[in-house]
Amino acid sequence: MATIPTTCIFCGAKPLSREHIWAKWLGRYIPKVYGRTKHAVTLGQFNRSVQPGRFHGSSHGNSAKLKVVCHPCNNGWMSRLQMRAKPWLAALAVGNWSDLETDAQEALAAWVTMFTMVIEFADPPTSIISSYERREFMRTQSALPGWKIWIGRYDLGDRGVFNHLSALIAEGPLYSEAAHHPNTQTTGFSIGKTVFQVFSTRSRHVEEDVGFALRYGLQTIWPARRTIRPPTTLHTFATFMEMSNDFANRASGDAPLTAVPLDLSRPGRPAA
Ligand SMILES: [Zn+2]
Protein backbone atom coordinates (compact mmCIF):
# COMPACT_ATOMS: atom_id res chain seq x y z
CA MET A 1 0.00 0.00 0.00
CA ALA A 2 1.48 3.29 -1.02
CA THR A 3 1.96 6.05 1.47
CA ILE A 4 2.34 9.77 0.92
CA PRO A 5 5.48 10.02 -1.23
CA THR A 6 8.65 11.58 0.16
CA THR A 7 10.61 11.30 -3.10
CA CYS A 8 9.64 11.99 -6.72
CA ILE A 9 7.16 9.30 -7.84
CA PHE A 10 8.92 9.11 -11.24
CA CYS A 11 12.68 9.49 -10.70
CA GLY A 12 13.01 9.02 -6.93
CA ALA A 13 14.83 12.33 -6.40
CA LYS A 14 14.38 14.86 -3.60
CA PRO A 15 13.20 17.42 -2.81
CA LEU A 16 9.60 17.33 -3.89
CA SER A 17 8.08 20.40 -5.37
CA ARG A 18 4.49 21.46 -4.76
CA GLU A 19 2.98 21.66 -8.24
CA HIS A 20 -0.37 22.58 -9.71
CA ILE A 21 -2.28 19.54 -10.92
CA TRP A 22 -3.57 21.50 -13.88
CA ALA A 23 -1.25 23.51 -16.08
CA LYS A 24 -2.15 27.21 -16.12
CA TRP A 25 -3.42 27.11 -19.69
CA LEU A 26 -5.65 24.13 -18.85
CA GLY A 27 -6.96 25.75 -15.68
CA ARG A 28 -9.44 27.82 -17.63
CA TYR A 29 -11.24 24.61 -18.66
CA ILE A 30 -11.44 23.33 -15.10
CA PRO A 31 -14.12 24.90 -12.91
CA LYS A 32 -12.68 27.22 -10.25
CA VAL A 33 -14.43 25.26 -7.55
CA TYR A 34 -14.40 21.62 -8.48
CA GLY A 35 -16.88 20.96 -5.69
CA ARG A 36 -18.91 18.42 -7.56
CA THR A 37 -15.87 16.30 -8.15
CA LYS A 38 -16.70 12.73 -7.24
CA HIS A 39 -14.34 10.29 -5.67
CA ALA A 40 -15.17 6.76 -4.63
CA VAL A 41 -13.19 3.70 -3.75
CA THR A 42 -14.32 0.14 -3.98
CA LEU A 43 -12.80 -3.26 -3.34
CA GLY A 44 -14.16 -5.98 -5.56
CA GLN A 45 -14.36 -9.75 -5.11
CA PHE A 46 -13.64 -10.83 -1.49
CA ASN A 47 -14.48 -7.58 0.08
CA ARG A 48 -17.56 -6.10 -1.46
CA SER A 49 -17.60 -3.01 0.67
CA VAL A 50 -17.66 0.34 -1.01
CA GLN A 51 -15.81 3.06 0.82
CA PRO A 52 -15.72 6.78 0.44
CA GLY A 53 -12.43 8.19 -0.84
CA ARG A 54 -9.92 9.24 1.77
CA PHE A 55 -10.34 12.90 1.05
CA HIS A 56 -13.49 14.80 0.72
CA GLY A 57 -14.85 18.23 1.39
CA SER A 58 -14.69 21.39 -0.59
CA SER A 59 -12.22 21.29 -3.43
CA HIS A 60 -10.03 23.94 -4.95
CA GLY A 61 -10.59 22.98 -8.53
CA ASN A 62 -8.13 24.47 -10.94
CA SER A 63 -5.82 25.67 -8.16
CA ALA A 64 -5.38 22.20 -6.61
CA LYS A 65 -1.78 21.15 -5.96
CA LEU A 66 0.02 17.92 -5.12
CA LYS A 67 3.57 17.44 -3.81
CA VAL A 68 4.62 14.20 -5.52
CA VAL A 69 7.17 15.08 -8.23
CA CYS A 70 10.50 16.91 -8.28
CA HIS A 71 11.17 20.22 -9.97
CA PRO A 72 13.44 18.80 -12.73
CA CYS A 73 10.80 16.20 -13.74
CA ASN A 74 7.97 18.71 -13.61
CA ASN A 75 9.81 21.31 -15.65
CA GLY A 76 11.62 18.87 -17.92
CA TRP A 77 10.12 15.81 -19.55
CA MET A 78 6.66 16.23 -17.94
CA SER A 79 6.40 19.75 -19.30
CA ARG A 80 7.52 18.65 -22.79
CA LEU A 81 5.01 15.79 -22.74
CA GLN A 82 2.30 18.28 -21.87
CA MET A 83 3.34 20.60 -24.71
CA ARG A 84 3.17 17.67 -27.12
CA ALA A 85 -0.50 17.02 -26.19
CA LYS A 86 -1.46 20.69 -25.89
CA PRO A 87 -2.66 21.41 -29.46
CA TRP A 88 -5.21 18.59 -29.29
CA LEU A 89 -6.16 19.09 -25.64
CA ALA A 90 -6.82 22.79 -26.22
CA ALA A 91 -9.09 22.02 -29.20
CA LEU A 92 -10.95 19.18 -27.46
CA ALA A 93 -11.47 21.24 -24.30
CA VAL A 94 -13.67 23.63 -26.27
CA GLY A 95 -15.41 20.86 -28.18
CA ASN A 96 -13.53 21.45 -31.42
CA TRP A 97 -13.54 17.86 -32.66
CA SER A 98 -11.87 16.44 -35.70
CA ASP A 99 -10.58 13.02 -36.71
CA LEU A 100 -7.64 12.04 -34.52
CA GLU A 101 -4.70 10.32 -36.13
CA THR A 102 -2.58 7.86 -34.18
CA ASP A 103 0.10 10.44 -33.32
CA ALA A 104 -2.60 12.61 -31.71
CA GLN A 105 -3.98 9.61 -29.83
CA GLU A 106 -0.50 8.68 -28.62
CA ALA A 107 0.23 12.22 -27.41
CA LEU A 108 -3.12 12.44 -25.62
CA ALA A 109 -2.79 8.94 -24.13
CA ALA A 110 0.68 9.77 -22.78
CA TRP A 111 -0.64 12.95 -21.18
CA VAL A 112 -3.64 11.11 -19.69
CA THR A 113 -1.26 8.46 -18.30
CA MET A 114 0.88 11.15 -16.65
CA PHE A 115 -2.17 12.82 -15.14
CA THR A 116 -3.51 9.48 -13.86
CA MET A 117 -0.18 8.56 -12.27
CA VAL A 118 0.03 11.91 -10.47
CA ILE A 119 -3.60 12.23 -9.40
CA GLU A 120 -3.59 8.74 -7.90
CA PHE A 121 -1.52 10.19 -5.06
CA ALA A 122 -4.39 12.38 -3.99
CA ASP A 123 -5.38 9.15 -2.20
CA PRO A 124 -2.26 7.02 -1.55
CA PRO A 125 -4.05 4.10 0.18
CA THR A 126 -6.00 3.32 -2.99
CA SER A 127 -3.09 3.84 -5.38
CA ILE A 128 -2.20 0.72 -7.37
CA ILE A 129 0.13 1.82 -10.17
CA SER A 130 3.57 0.27 -9.59
CA SER A 131 6.85 2.16 -9.41
CA TYR A 132 7.98 -0.08 -12.30
CA GLU A 133 5.14 1.29 -14.45
CA ARG A 134 6.04 4.87 -13.53
CA ARG A 135 9.70 4.29 -14.41
CA GLU A 136 8.72 2.68 -17.71
CA PHE A 137 6.45 5.60 -18.45
CA MET A 138 9.22 8.11 -17.69
CA ARG A 139 11.62 6.14 -19.91
CA THR A 140 9.27 5.67 -22.89
CA GLN A 141 6.97 8.69 -22.38
CA SER A 142 4.27 6.57 -23.91
CA ALA A 143 1.10 5.07 -22.43
CA LEU A 144 1.83 1.54 -21.23
CA PRO A 145 1.01 -1.90 -22.63
CA GLY A 146 -2.15 -3.27 -21.02
CA TRP A 147 -3.56 0.16 -20.21
CA LYS A 148 -6.83 1.18 -21.88
CA ILE A 149 -7.76 4.82 -22.47
CA TRP A 150 -10.97 6.13 -24.01
CA ILE A 151 -12.11 9.58 -25.07
CA GLY A 152 -15.65 10.95 -25.12
CA ARG A 153 -17.70 14.10 -25.57
CA TYR A 154 -19.06 15.86 -22.52
CA ASP A 155 -21.79 18.41 -22.04
CA LEU A 156 -20.64 20.00 -18.83
CA GLY A 157 -22.45 23.20 -18.14
CA ASP A 158 -20.26 24.32 -15.21
CA ARG A 159 -19.86 20.82 -13.91
CA GLY A 160 -16.46 19.17 -14.12
CA VAL A 161 -16.11 15.52 -13.22
CA PHE A 162 -13.44 13.36 -11.65
CA ASN A 163 -13.98 9.74 -10.63
CA HIS A 164 -11.23 7.46 -9.38
CA LEU A 165 -11.98 3.91 -8.31
CA SER A 166 -9.74 1.10 -7.24
CA ALA A 167 -10.80 -2.50 -7.07
CA LEU A 168 -9.43 -5.94 -6.45
CA ILE A 169 -9.35 -8.56 -9.16
CA ALA A 170 -8.66 -11.88 -7.41
CA GLU A 171 -6.05 -14.08 -9.02
CA GLY A 172 -7.33 -17.61 -8.43
CA PRO A 173 -7.05 -20.02 -5.49
CA LEU A 174 -3.52 -19.06 -4.46
CA TYR A 175 -4.59 -15.53 -3.88
CA SER A 176 -4.48 -14.59 -0.24
CA GLU A 177 -7.35 -12.61 1.07
CA ALA A 178 -5.01 -11.27 3.73
CA ALA A 179 -3.36 -9.14 1.06
CA HIS A 180 -6.54 -7.74 -0.39
CA HIS A 181 -5.08 -4.47 -1.50
CA PRO A 182 -6.68 -3.29 -4.75
CA ASN A 183 -4.74 -4.11 -7.92
CA THR A 184 -6.86 -2.30 -10.49
CA GLN A 185 -7.81 1.32 -11.03
CA THR A 186 -10.11 3.31 -13.23
CA THR A 187 -9.94 7.08 -13.55
CA GLY A 188 -12.35 9.31 -15.43
CA PHE A 189 -12.22 13.09 -15.72
CA SER A 190 -13.33 15.97 -17.85
CA ILE A 191 -11.29 18.68 -19.51
CA GLY A 192 -13.88 21.17 -20.63
CA LYS A 193 -16.04 19.44 -23.22
CA THR A 194 -14.06 16.23 -23.33
CA VAL A 195 -13.85 13.26 -20.97
CA PHE A 196 -11.14 10.66 -20.63
CA GLN A 197 -11.56 7.24 -19.04
CA VAL A 198 -8.57 5.10 -18.02
CA PHE A 199 -8.25 1.45 -16.99
CA SER A 200 -5.10 -0.20 -15.64
CA THR A 201 -4.43 -3.30 -13.58
CA ARG A 202 -1.59 -5.24 -11.99
CA SER A 203 -3.63 -8.43 -12.32
CA ARG A 204 -3.76 -10.64 -15.40
CA HIS A 205 -7.25 -9.43 -16.26
CA VAL A 206 -7.53 -8.04 -19.77
CA GLU A 207 -10.16 -5.36 -20.13
CA GLU A 208 -11.77 -5.39 -23.54
CA ASP A 209 -11.82 -1.86 -24.94
CA VAL A 210 -13.84 -2.10 -28.17
CA GLY A 211 -17.07 -3.26 -26.52
CA PHE A 212 -16.70 -0.66 -23.78
CA ALA A 213 -16.24 2.09 -26.36
CA LEU A 214 -19.32 0.95 -28.28
CA ARG A 215 -21.46 0.63 -25.15
CA TYR A 216 -20.75 4.19 -24.02
CA GLY A 217 -20.24 6.01 -27.31
CA LEU A 218 -16.51 6.52 -26.72
CA GLN A 219 -13.44 6.05 -28.89
CA THR A 220 -10.36 4.14 -27.80
CA ILE A 221 -7.19 6.27 -27.96
CA TRP A 222 -4.97 3.67 -26.28
CA PRO A 223 -3.97 1.36 -27.73
CA ALA A 224 -3.86 3.68 -30.76
CA ARG A 225 -4.71 1.55 -33.79
CA ARG A 226 -5.97 3.80 -36.56
CA THR A 227 -7.42 7.26 -37.20
CA ILE A 228 -10.63 7.69 -35.19
CA ARG A 229 -13.77 9.69 -35.87
CA PRO A 230 -15.21 11.97 -33.16
CA PRO A 231 -17.11 9.98 -30.50
CA THR A 232 -20.86 9.79 -31.01
CA THR A 233 -22.37 10.18 -27.55
CA LEU A 234 -22.61 13.50 -25.76
CA HIS A 235 -22.18 12.51 -22.11
CA THR A 236 -23.95 14.26 -19.27
CA PHE A 237 -22.82 14.10 -15.66
CA ALA A 238 -25.20 11.16 -15.08
CA THR A 239 -24.15 9.14 -18.12
CA PHE A 240 -20.50 9.88 -17.39
CA MET A 241 -20.87 8.46 -13.87
CA GLU A 242 -22.64 5.37 -15.18
CA MET A 243 -19.83 4.82 -17.69
CA SER A 244 -17.07 5.66 -15.23
CA ASN A 245 -18.46 3.32 -12.53
CA ASP A 246 -19.02 0.46 -14.98
CA PHE A 247 -15.89 -1.51 -14.22
CA ALA A 248 -16.09 -1.08 -10.45
CA ASN A 249 -19.73 -2.14 -10.50
CA ARG A 250 -18.72 -5.32 -12.31
CA ALA A 251 -15.83 -5.90 -9.92
CA SER A 252 -17.90 -5.36 -6.82
CA GLY A 253 -20.92 -7.37 -7.87
CA ASP A 254 -24.16 -5.81 -6.76
CA ALA A 255 -22.63 -3.51 -4.17
CA PRO A 256 -24.03 -0.04 -4.52
CA LEU A 257 -21.48 2.57 -5.36
CA THR A 258 -21.42 5.71 -3.30
CA ALA A 259 -19.42 8.72 -4.25
CA VAL A 260 -18.14 11.64 -2.24
CA PRO A 261 -16.32 14.76 -3.36
CA LEU A 262 -12.55 14.53 -3.50
CA ASP A 263 -10.58 17.35 -1.96
CA LEU A 264 -7.53 17.65 -4.16
CA SER A 265 -6.26 20.58 -2.15
CA ARG A 266 -5.58 18.65 1.03
CA PRO A 267 -3.70 15.44 0.26
CA GLY A 268 -2.90 13.44 3.34
CA ARG A 269 -5.99 14.44 5.24
CA PRO A 270 -8.12 11.40 6.11
CA ALA A 271 -11.85 11.50 5.62
CA ALA A 272 -13.72 12.77 8.64
ZN1 LIG B 1 11.66 13.50 -10.56
Image (cartoon, rainbow, N blue to C red):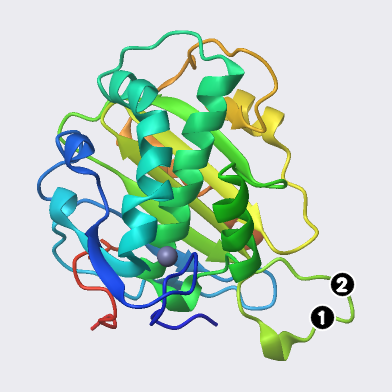
Location of the C terminus (image quadrant): bottom left
Q: Which residue is mark 1?
A: 175
Query: In the rendered structure, are the residues bearing label 2 and label 1 in contact, judged by CB atoms less than 8 Å apart?
Result: yes
Give the x, y percent position of residue 163.
39, 52
Q: Quadrant of residue 160?
A: top left
Give the x, y percent position of residue 40.
40, 63
Q: Quadrant of residue 48?
A: bottom right
Amino acid type at image mark 1: Tyr
Q: Which residue is mark 2?
A: 172
**Mark 1 vs ligand 1: CB under 8 Å?**
no
Residue at horizontal 35%, vertical 67%? 70
Give the x, y percent position of residue 144.
65, 47
Badge 2: how crowded within 10 Å, few (<14), some, or many (20+)? few
Q: Is label 1 in a helix, a strand or a loop?
A: loop
Give the x, y percent position of residue 244.
48, 45
Q: Quadrant of residue 136?
A: bottom right
Q: Nearer the viewer, residue 102 or 235?
A: 102
Residue at horizontal 27%, vertical 74%? 267
80 with respect to 140 (left or right): left
Q: Is residue 65 above or below residue 104?
A: below
Amino acid type at image mark 2: Gly
Q: CA distance from mark 2 to mark 1?
A: 6 Å
Q: Residue furthest left?
A: 32
Q: Is residue 91 above or below residue 216?
A: above
Q: Is residue 126 above or below residue 164?
A: below
